[in-house]
Image (tube, grey):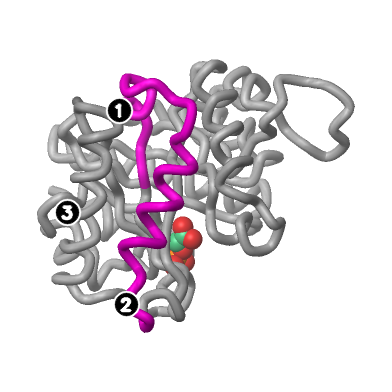
């Protein structure tokens, strides 16, 4: 298993060609400047910007920075207007794909059963899924956070072999922490990661990497990354600001 922290940038529906180029160039240079202390870095731009980011990363010739998509179709190909297949992401140079993000679960009605289908297609296309799971504020306040997240995890990994589950990446992202500036305290993050590690050990044998996501920024990255069981971060808003993102990468060193 890769022991380097993994920092994945989820740009969501932000950016344009100029920003994509600038951020990719900055990230490659920043990762190179950190040398062996650099984490594994993955940029997940909107699909249209993937070729621009790829070209900029290649031209920058810095340390390897990976690319990921933000979603993919559960289908290999066909009459699915507007969708993007896992094979297309792979062909465009992606190594990863974010799946089951809460914005897709909430805004597009994605169920864990659909996410499980996407997981299978992504893996068979040679991509590593970053599977997002997380509780709502209501679930946390009712004391049901661990149960809710465990259920999402089990349902989203259904149908994968232990080896496939172990080779995936999981991101614990409390829905109420995303884009809100709020984060759970370190004890709560640690407790959820310990709980998920137990479930993943049962499902996958060798547990996959589990990231934390939700309002990670320069000022809290070091503390969050030091929590036992946290193998990296999925970063939204702060990944669009070069200085903030650079500081998060430095916090891994
Ligand atoms: P945020 O988003 O860092 O802006 O909270 C994280 C995510 O949605 O992956």
- Closer to us: mark 1 or mark 2? 2
State which quarter of the image contains the N terminus: top left
Residue 53 locus on image (x, y percent): 56, 37
Mark 2 / mark 3, whichever is N-terminal: 2
Q: Which residues are magenta?
A: 141-170
Secondary structure beneath label 2:
loop
Residue under the point 35% across and 68% down = 145
Residue 4 figure quarter:
top left
Mark 1 / mark 2, whichever is N-terminal: 2
Residues 20 and 137: in front is 137
Q: Is residue 3 visible?
A: yes
Q: Main secondary structure of the magenta part?
A: helix
Q: CA distance from mark 3 to mark 1?
A: 16 Å
Mark 3 / mark 1, whichever is N-terminal: 1
Q: Is residue 207 left or right of residue 49?
A: left
Q: Residues within 10 Å of mark 3 (few under 14, many from 20)?
A: some
Q: Is residue 49 left or right of residue 58?
A: right
Residue under the point 20% across and 28% down = 206
Residues 154 and 211: in front is 154
Q: Residues within 10 Å of mark 2 (few under 14, many from 20)?
A: few
Q: CA distance from mark 1 to mark 2?
A: 28 Å
């Amino acid at each position: 298993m890769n022991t380097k922290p993994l920092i994945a940038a989820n740009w969501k529906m932000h950016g344009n060609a100029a920003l994509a180029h600038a951020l990719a160039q900055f990230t490659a240079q920043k990762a190179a400047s950190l040398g062996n202390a650099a984490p594994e870095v993955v940029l997940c731009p909107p699909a249209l910007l993937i070729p621009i980011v790829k070209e900029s990363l290649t031209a920058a010739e810095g340390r390897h920075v990976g690319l990921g998509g933000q979603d993919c179709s559960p289908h290999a190909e066909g009459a699915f207007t507007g969708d993007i297949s896992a094979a297309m992401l792979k062909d465009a140079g992606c190594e990863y794909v974010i799946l089951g993000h809460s914005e897709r679960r909430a805004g597009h009605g994605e169920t864990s059963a659909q996410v499980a289908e996407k997981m299978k297609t992504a893996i068979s296309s040679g991509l590593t899924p970053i599977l997002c799971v997380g509780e709502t504020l209501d679930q946390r306040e009712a004391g049901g956070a661990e149960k809710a997240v465990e259920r999402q995890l089990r349902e989203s990994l259904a149908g994968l072999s232990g080896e496939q589950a172990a080779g995936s990446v999981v991101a614990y992202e409390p829905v109420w922490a995303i884009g809100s500036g709020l984060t759970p305290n370190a004890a709560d993050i640690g407790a959820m990661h310990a709980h998920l590690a137990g479930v993943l050990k049962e499902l996958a044998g060798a547990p996959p990497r589990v990231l934390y996501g939700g309002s990670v920024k320069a000022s809290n990255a070091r503390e969050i990354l030091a929590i036992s069981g946290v193998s990296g971060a999925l970063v939204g808003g702060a990944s669009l600001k070069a200085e903030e993102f650079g500081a998060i990468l430095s916090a891994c060193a």
